[in-house]
Structure formats: C-alpha cells, structure tokens
C-alpha cells in the first residue's frame, strides 16, 4: 500500500470531530503522488461529501477549466482541503476542526513534496499566510524552504463575483512561470497597482 493510500484509510476512519458523524464520506484529497502543484481548498461541500472526492461541484468544474488553461488535468496535480469532512449546511470550518485536521494535511504535503502550494480561499490562505489579505497577495508567490506558496481566490467566490473570475484566470496563468522558475515571485509595481485597484473596486479583501 502506498503512503498516500494508507493515509486515506486513516482519514476515512477519523472521528476526531463531531462532523465525522454527519458526513457521508470523508474527502481525503486526490491526485498524483508526484504532483508539482498542490491546491488546497476549504472543505468538502454537498457533492464532495457524496462522492468522497474534492472539488466535484460547480467550483470544481471551474477549477478544471483553470487547470486546462495551463495545460494541466486534475490527474497531474494534487487537490486537498483544509478539512476533510463536510461541515453541516456548508458552514465555515471551526478552529478546532482545522486544528484536528491539520496533521492530515501536513502528512499529505510531506508525502507529495510539491514545488508549489496554491491556497484557494481564506481558510487555506490563513494557514500559510496568517495576517495577509487576499486582495493584496493573490497571484504572488513566496518561496519558503524550497516550496512556492501562492494564494488565490476561491473558485466558488470567483464564480459568484464576475470580476474575480478574470482575476483568478490571470493568476492561474502565472503558475507555469513560477514552477519553471522563470517568473519573479514578487509582482511588478504595475501588477501590484492593478491588483490593488481591482481589490478596492470590489471591496474584496476577504473571500
Ligand atoms: N470547495 C472547497 O473548498 N473544497 C471542495 O472540495 C469543494 C468546494
């Protein structure tokens, strides 16, 4: 059994949180064990809970489109969530649930050793960029101990807010450059100005 399959078995049996009782299936994550990019979303929703797979609803469909825009399929990347069980009625994850689930995510990162971790949405971003605001740092990359961390808007938020859709599409297009090491990890002055203007217009510092 591979390290990931063993981990999935353990996640499937996890009962650390109350929400384990209301889940249909836990959603450990999926993708290539040797993936260069790992995407980390928030929590399973209605469809994910039924299928036991991450990002299979409308946000997932959009994520697939974003991946296709950089010539990637979901089989080539790794997709996980901050928490592995669906919070009832899709409420926000609780701090204790995030804490309880953290070791699973840490183990996934340890096994996959991605070149880049892309956070999708505020809970995932808060884990890796505490104190930062998405309106300021989305689409930029920060290198820490050999891993590039990139914060992005959540695809579901982007779907519901017209202008964010273009922002996340543009942010995705930067990923291949980051991965191949050809792009600067910090935005140019012009890029920064443009993204600050969009964020101000949208009044969207927290998504
Ligand atoms: N939203 C997430 O953050 N994760 C999923 O798996 C599905 C929707």
Image (tube, rainbow, N blue to C red):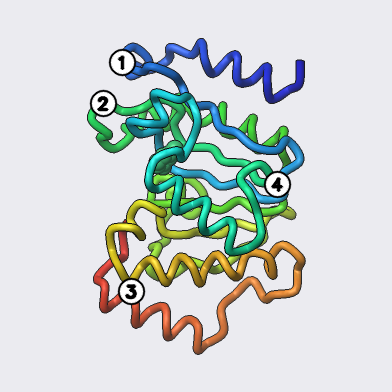
Looking at the rendering, in which quadrant would you find the C terminus?
Answer: bottom left
Residue bearing the label numbered 3: 199
Q: Nearer the viewer, mark 4 or mark 1?
A: 1
Q: Are marks 1 and 3 in contact (CB under 8 Å)?
A: no
Looking at the rendering, in which quadrant would you find the N terminus?
Answer: top right
Q: Position of residue 40 (x, y in %)?
A: 52, 44
Q: Are marks 4 and 2 in contact (CB under 8 Å)?
A: no
Describe the element under mark 3 as helix, strand or loop: helix
Measured in 3D between alpha carbons, the distance from the residue under mark 1 to the one under mark 2, in whole angstroms, is 7 Å
* Number of the label disc, if any, that sits on residue 133: none
Residue drawn at x 73%, y 22% as measured from the top left: 3
Residue bearing the label numbered 4: 114
Residue bearing the label numbered 2: 88
Q: Are marks 1 and 2 in contact (CB under 8 Å)?
A: yes
Q: Is residue 158 above or below residue 48?
A: below
The residue closer to the viewer here, 138 or 44, is 44
Q: Residues within 10 Å of mark 2 (few under 14, many from 20)?
A: few
> Does label 4 or label 3 sit earlier along the sequence?
4
Measured in 3D between alpha carbons, the distance from the residue under mark 4 to the one under mark 3, in whole angstroms, is 29 Å
Measured in 3D between alpha carbons, the distance from the residue under mark 1 to the one under mark 3, in whole angstroms, is 37 Å
Measured in 3D between alpha carbons, the distance from the residue under mark 4 to the one under mark 2, in whole angstroms, is 31 Å
Q: Residues within 10 Å of mark 4 (few under 14, many from 20)?
A: many
Q: Is residue 58 above or below residue 15?
A: below
Q: Position of residue 43 (x, y in %)?
A: 40, 35
Residue bearing the label numbered 1: 22
Residue 42 in view here:
no
Describe the element under mark 1 as helix, strand or loop: loop
Q: Position of residue 9 (x, y in %)?
A: 60, 14
Q: Quadrant of ligand 1?
A: top left
The residue closer to the viewer here, 88 or 184, is 88
Mark 2 CB in 8 Å range of ligand 1?
Answer: no
Residue drawn at x 39%, y 25% as measured from the top left: 49
């Amino acid at each position: 059994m591979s390290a990931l399959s063993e981990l999935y078995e353990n996640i499937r049996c996890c009962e650390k949180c109350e929400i384990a009782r209301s889940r249909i299936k836990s959603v450990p994550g999926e993708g290539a064990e040797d993936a260069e990019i790992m995407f980390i979303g928030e929590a399973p929703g209605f469809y994910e809970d039924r299928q036991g797979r991450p990002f299979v609803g409308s946000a997932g469909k959009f994520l697939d489109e974003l991946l296709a825009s950089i010539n990637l399929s979901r089989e080539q990347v790794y997709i996980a969530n901050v928490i592995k069980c669906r919070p009832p009625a899709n409420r926000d994850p609780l701090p204790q649930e995030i804490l309880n689930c953290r070791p699973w995510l840490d183990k996934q990162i340890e096994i996959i050793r991605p070149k880049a971790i892309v956070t999708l949405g505020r809970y995932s971003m808060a884990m890796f960029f505490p104190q930062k605001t998405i309106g300021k740092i989305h689409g930029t990359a920060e290198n820490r101990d050999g891993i590039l961390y990139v914060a992005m808007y959540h695809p579901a938020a982007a779907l519901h807010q017209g202008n964010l859709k273009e922002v996340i599409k543009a942010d995705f297009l930067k990923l291949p450059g980051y991965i191949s090491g050809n792009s600067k990890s910090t935005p140019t002055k012009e890029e920064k100005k443009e993204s600050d203007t969009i964020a101000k217009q949208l009044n969207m510092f927290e998504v």
